[in-house]
Amino acid sequence: MYNIHELLKVAQLTTELLRKALMNTARFRLWVETHSDVVWDLVRVYLGVGLFLKAIFYLMHRDYLLKLMDDMDTGWFAPAMIAHYVILAHLFGGLLMALGLLTRVAAIVQIPMLLAATLYIYLPKMMFLEPRQNLEFSALVLFLLILTAVFGAGRWSLDHYLSRKLQPEAYRPEEPVPSHAH
């Protein structure tokens, strides 16, 4: 049986651990707020790697991809054509996004596929009993691709590195404007 002193000691240790966790959370939140460009770059890299791996999955399971294309009822030749586009766009677009090279182009190339997957493949199946995560996941990836197309790569990308090499004058700090105070 625990005595009152042991219970107080456990409560004090628990309170101390919670206080430290909250302080670490506050520090982490402050870091994220001051380094939002790094966080955005991590999202871009994750999204690019995910699209690249999805292309590898489709390469290994072409029958699954062709079944998805057949569900769209696009005609007899379109599924194979679309499947090739999907695989190549995910493979090269995902790699380019992960590297941060031609990021906006790589994101824009992906958007029609994710829009079609969301609206024509997964949305019609939303009310059925099959797992619905595909709809939510496709919509999330579509949303992130749109954000990437709008905001671009970020500071930790080859786009940023190459633009600094090609246009160094655009990245020089501005000289302070002298004040005209009397």
Image (tube, rainbow, N blue to C red):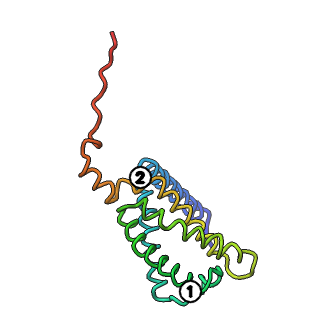
What number is the disc on residue 117?
none
Identify which residue is drawn at 59% across, 82% down: 69
Three-letter amino acid code at disc 2?
Asp
Q: Earlier in the sequence, mark 2 or mark 1?
A: 2
* Residue to which mark 2 is pinned: 37
Asked if marks 2 and 1 touch (Cβ < 8 Å), the reply is: no
Pick whichever, 39 or 119, lies toward us.
119
Pick the quarter of the image with the C terminus.
top left
Q: Is label 2 or label 1 in front?
A: 1
Taking the image as shown, residue 117 lies to the left or right of residue 152, namely right
Marks 2/1: CA distance? 38 Å
Three-letter amino acid code at disc 1?
Leu
Across and down, in percent, residue 174 comes to 29, 34
Across and down, in percent, residue 14 comes to 55, 61
Identify which residue is drawn at 39% across, 67% down: 98
Pick whichever, 74 or 26, lies toward us.
74
Pick whichever, 5 or 94, lies toward us.
94
* Residue to which mark 1 is pinned: 66
Crowding at mark 1 (Cα within 10 Å: few <14, some 14-19, many 20+): some
Pick whichever, 62 or 173, lies toward us.
62
Taking the image as shown, residue 83 lies to the left or right of residue 98, namely right
Across and down, in percent, residue 175 comes to 27, 30
Identify which residue is drawn at 56% across, 85% down: 77
Circle 2 sits in a helix, a strand or a loop, which is it?
A: helix
Pick the quarter of the image with the N terminus.
bottom right
